Amino acid sequence: MTIRRVALLLISTGLLTVACTAGPPADPVTEPRGATSSAAPTEPPTVVPTQTPTETPAETTVATPSPEPSRLRLPGMDAGTKTVLKAGPRKGSMVVGDVPPGKDELWVLFKCRGQGKAEIILEPGINMPFTCLDDVISPIMNRLDLGERKTLTVRVQAPDTVEWALRVTR
């Protein structure tokens, strides 16, 4: 069976629903699997009428999928640092855990998304409040030079509307 006959058969049975469009874009962009692009299409998809020799022209529409929001992930870390505590991504409040005493400075890396206020609490005595925005991942980084202290207990207080991820490094 030739390609033309197969195409005619698929069109006549209603199994072929995709219309042919103009050739590929002038400069295609190659992205890894699962990556999303922030570039908006410059033109809407082309709609091409399909026709068989015995039928009248029919128009097929091409649906463009809506972009998915970015996944919130744990904050990255610099080379030469060591993760001492991490949590997330998650929503709502949580006692994350304890940071053992040490001489080196602490880096508190935090990302959040969703309308509301989040607060990182290092007990005893350190509060870091943040405002998180809807549909925007807000990265936050704080350096704490605490000297030698006792163990710090880390808590995150956030409403269920705020998704967050935390990493503490030394």
Image (spheres, rainbow, N blue to C red):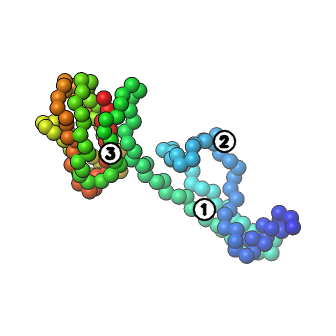
Whether 65 is drawn above or below 24: the answer is: below
**Number of other residues with Cα within 10 Å of mark 2, as a class: few under 14, some 14 to 19, many 20 or more:** few
At horizontal 40% and vertical 45% (from top left) the residue drawn is 73
Residue linked to disc 2: 26
Residue linked to disc 3: 87
Please state which of residues 56 and 134 is positioned toward the viewer in this rendering: 134
Which is more N-terminal, label 3 or label 2? Answer: 2
- Percent from the top left, x then y, of residue 132? 27, 46
At horizontal 83% and vertical 65% (from top left) the residue drawn is 4
Give the alpha-carbon distance from disc 2 to disc 3, as whole Å: 44 Å
Q: Which mark is residue 62?
A: 1
Asked whether residue 117 is in view, the answer is no
At horizontal 57% and vertical 50% (from top left) the residue drawn is 43
Q: Which mark is residue 144?
A: none
In the rendered view, does 103 fall on the left or right side of 81? left
**Number of other residues with Cα within 10 Å of mark 3, as a class: few under 14, some 14 to 19, many 20 or more:** some
Please state which of residues 101 and 76 is positioned toward the viewer in this rendering: 101
Whether 106 is drawn above or below 35: the answer is: above
